[in-house]
Image (spheres, rainbow, N blue to C red):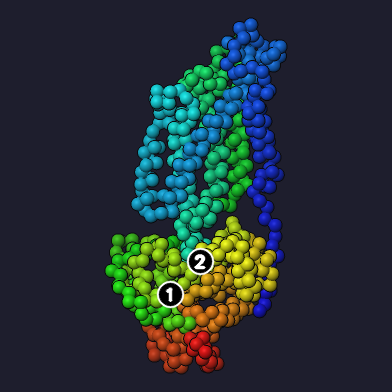
Amino acid sequence: MSTSDTAAPEARVPAWRRLAKDPQAVAAFAVLFVIFTLGLLAPLVTGHGPNESDLSAVNAPVGSPGHPLGADESGRDILARLLHSARTAAVSALIGTGVALAIGVTAGLVGGYFGRRVRFATEWLFNLVMTFPGVLLLIVLMPLTGGDYRATMLIFGVLLAPGLYRIVRNLVLGVKHELYVDAARVAGLGDARILRRHVLSVVRGPVIIAAAFMLGSSIAVQSGLAFLGVGSLEIPSFGAMISSGFRNLYIAPAQFLWPSLALGLTTASFVLLGNALRDALEGTGPKPLKIGSGQRVAVAPEDGDGEGALLEVRGLAIAYPAPNGSLKTVVEDVSLTVEKGQVLGLVGESGSGKTQTAFATLGVLPAEAVVTGGSIRFEGRELVGLDDHALSRLRGKEIAYIPQEPMSNLDPSYRVGAQLVEGVRAALPVSAREARQRVLALLERVGIADPKRCFDSYPHQISGGMAQRVLIAGAVASRPKLLIADEPTTALDVTVQAEILDLLRDLQSELGMAVLLVTHNFGVVADLCDRIAVMREGAIVESGDVRDVFREPRHPYTRMLLDSILDGSAVREDRPAAERSLT
Ligand SMILES: Nc1ncnc2c1ncn2[C@@H]1O[C@H](COP(=O)(O)OP(=O)(O)OP(=O)(O)O)[C@@H](O)[C@H]1O
């Protein structure tokens, strides 16, 4: 098997390295580091307490003995107050941003990922929070907070949360229909894992950027409130110092200068850091909506008796809501059967409903699709109406899937190996070490020359053919009973197509698995399939043994398709795979 599709992995520069090369980020970080480290070490840097008055030092100028930055109107050391104010600023920033992150990110993930009802509920709640006039509310709630700035910042965090909620919700809505998220779902991964692994990685960048700005604005708001005299007078704060300096502006202007400089530098550094982070993390934004999952069913599920073929689809009908509110049927009365170890080719022109039929079997139809009729039984068990939890236990283990576009089905943020290990561990009770060994062996089995290198590569570092081999390795890892392959070679060039088809054929007979092969290519059907079902405009017009249909197509549409592409030599004469795997 050729491995000419191996591409040399190129270095991927981590975000922190890009940040380290950005002078704006380095300068901002350095300023913040100095201010907050000095704040932390305040008792070591100065012998004065922040509220310690020395009446002999009232309005002492800069450079006075024992008061390098002078003293204020009450004789309090300005350096000590500045350093303790930095501590207050750090605590305010951490509380405000921490609360906003905890509430906003959690609600955004939940509201964006789960169904419409959950989204409406979170939306309503956050819209309500947004109607409150922020700063005014913090002032009005003074009696409740007892003037404690930490309690005030806690409330401020709640007021900041809607902003984060919206960012996260929008990103999640964008990413949850990505093919690689569907692929993870199809691989049997649970919601919590998908959220943690694939969705959080996408929202991480914008959340970090927003958090940097929120740290700055928490400090600015706390200082603003202290400037207005809201809160305890005992707490040293840049705002309180600016207020006191303001009163003495004409007597001792330096008293106004120091806290203004510290506050300005701190908030500006957070803004600059936020901008630098935005540049460094660029590329993790929302992606266009593609397909989603879910299974809306408008048909009573039939009782299963546990008997029959491996996969039995009867009278399946799928519809989508049209703009006028009616339902437009895209698949109608589709019936097909796949026996154990058999390869069924589902053929038809583009838009004939092949993918919809395959997606319905996998339970990953777009959320707006409605199954309006029929039944899909796997080993006698009815899949129509089954909840996502039960379906996800079948997907990736009993039923596996190979997509049309391999690249879109790999999460660009993770190494190939990590994604495969995750899939294997979701399907089988094995340790991480064991899963890794299995994945390396599988990569070798699917014809990848340097499995270790491929394991450590990011998806952008491997070719399309290699990506499809990776996905095939992932799909067969759990030795599924049924493999659904949706035009698995369409996105690949011709020589790689042939290799992938060879690989599929080998694996099919090796594992004795049944395959539902969606294709528009009769050559592929002739090469791989035992049976064929021809679809046109959402319905099956003809089905039967491949040799019979190729020799004597009964439906004019099948005849037309065959006439246009086939010469007699393409018909396979060996025995069907089902028979081969029995011997
Ligand atoms: N989200 C959707 N909303 C409305 N109609 C849809 C949606 N997805 C698919 N359809 C319609 O369903 C029909 C069948 O589509 P399907 O993707 O199953 O075709 P296909 O035979 O697999 O085609 P192809 O080979 O191009 O993938 C098409 O007419 C398509 O327009």
Q: Amino acid at mark 1?
A: Lys
- Image coordinates of residue 246 in percent, x first then y, are 56, 15
First-in-chain label (2 vs 1)? 1
- The residue lying at 35 percent from left, 69 percent from top is 384
Residue lying at the far top of the rendered structure: 56
Residue 442 seen by the camera: yes
Q: Secondary structure at mark 2?
A: helix
- Image coordinates of residue 434 in percent, x first then y, are 60, 65
Q: Which residue is mark 1?
A: 354
**Callout 2 touching callout 1 (CB < 8 Å):** no
Q: Amino acid at mark 2?
A: Ala
Kindly report the distance in space between the C-alpha atoms of the residues bearing marks 2 and 1: 27 Å
- The residue lying at 71 percent from left, 11 percent from top is 65
- Image coordinates of residue 11 in percent, x first then y, are 70, 57
- The residue lying at 61 percent from left, 7 percent from top is 55
In the depicted structure, whether residue 1 falls above or below residue 393: below
- The residue lying at 37 percent from left, 42 percent from top is 125
Drawn side of residue 237 relative to residue 342, left or right: right
Q: Which residue is mark 2?
A: 427
Q: Residues within 10 Å of mark 2 (few under 14, many from 20)?
A: many
Q: Residues within 10 Å of mark 1 (few under 14, many from 20)?
A: many
Q: Is mark 1 within 8 Å of ligand 1?
A: yes
In the depicted structure, whether residue 69 falls above or below residue 207: above
Q: Secondary structure at mark 1?
A: helix
